[in-house]
Image (cartoon, rainbow, N blue to C red):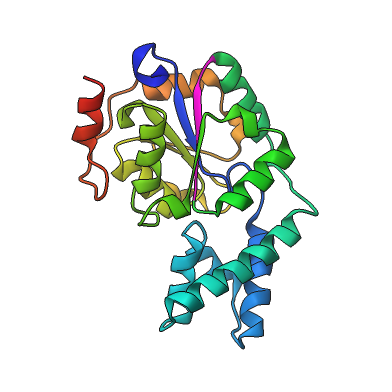
Amino acid sequence: MTGAQNGKVTVIFDMDGVIVDSAQPHYLAWRTMLKRKGIDYSYEEFKTNFGRRTDMQVRRILGDISDEGVAATVREKDILFREIVSENVAAFPGAVELIKSLKAYGGRLAIGSSSPTETVHLIIGTLGIKDDFDTIVCGGEVTESKPSPQIFLLAAKKLSALPERCIVIEDTVVGVTAAKKGGMRAVAVTNTHPRESLSEADLVVDSLKELTVNTLENLLHNTAPAFSPTIGFSLDAIRRAHA
């Protein structure tokens, strides 16, 4: 357990909006799919939903819809997105470099993304960083979407890391809230949301180029964050597993 045993940093990355500049492809996929259903989907509405699981976004947008309808709509949207993004996958400045430097340092790395498994593997494979991650947790593995901390707590569990030894890097308000609810440090990058909306984070940066291994180590060794009760994963149970 690297994060708790020898002091090396454990970092959980969100993918969309943090590692890869995918907001516009996601919006185009949503807009195209919803236009087929006669729904005009604004970019402002998209931004309020960005970062949540696709199935939960479908229910928020379409309202009364069967489980089969949700599943079909999710598949349609995800296929559209992968078609769009496969033609142009662009990492945010500093993202790949930070991941590589953390891995070289001996850090434990995970992805905690609301995106489907196929999409995550497509993107990180294209960027050449798939092997840098020790584990990947996607939205389908948990029952609750962000701002629930489930996805990050599961990532910590898979890394055998205590939540208080983890740093989450996020770009959305719901993602930052999820990290804090899980008792983790939160670093927010202003790729998709303004700085003032991300004030709950322990550190806010305008680019991942501003982050170094030392920056994250220093953040980790500051006063431990307060814990919040969570549903689905017990922080006490995780701690007992490392006693």
Reply above or below: 115 against 179: below
60 or 218: nearer the viewer = 60
Q: Residue furthest front?
A: 68
Q: Residue furthest right?
A: 87
**x, y percent for residue 15:** 57, 45
Name the residue: 69% across, 39% down.
125
**x, y percent for residue 188:** 48, 42
Q: Residue furthest bottom?
A: 38
**x, y percent for residue 109:** 51, 29
Name the residue: 70% across, 58% down.
82
**x, y percent for residue 195:** 49, 48
Reply above or below: 88 against 39: above
Magenta span = 106-113
Q: Is residue 109 magenta?
A: yes
* Residue 200 showing in the rendered view: no
78 to the left or right of 168? right
Quadrant of the rendering where the C terminus is positioned: top left
* Residue 157 showing in the rendered view: yes
- Give the dominant element type of the magenta stretch: helix, strand or loop: strand
**Tally of marks:** 0
Q: Is residue 21 magenta?
A: no
Name the residue: 28% across, 32% down.
225
Reply above or below: 27 against 141: below
Quadrant of the rendering where the N terminus is positioned: top left
Name the residue: 66% across, 40% down.
124
Q: Quadrant of residue 223?
A: top left
47 or 152: nearer the viewer = 152
31 or 195: nearer the viewer = 31
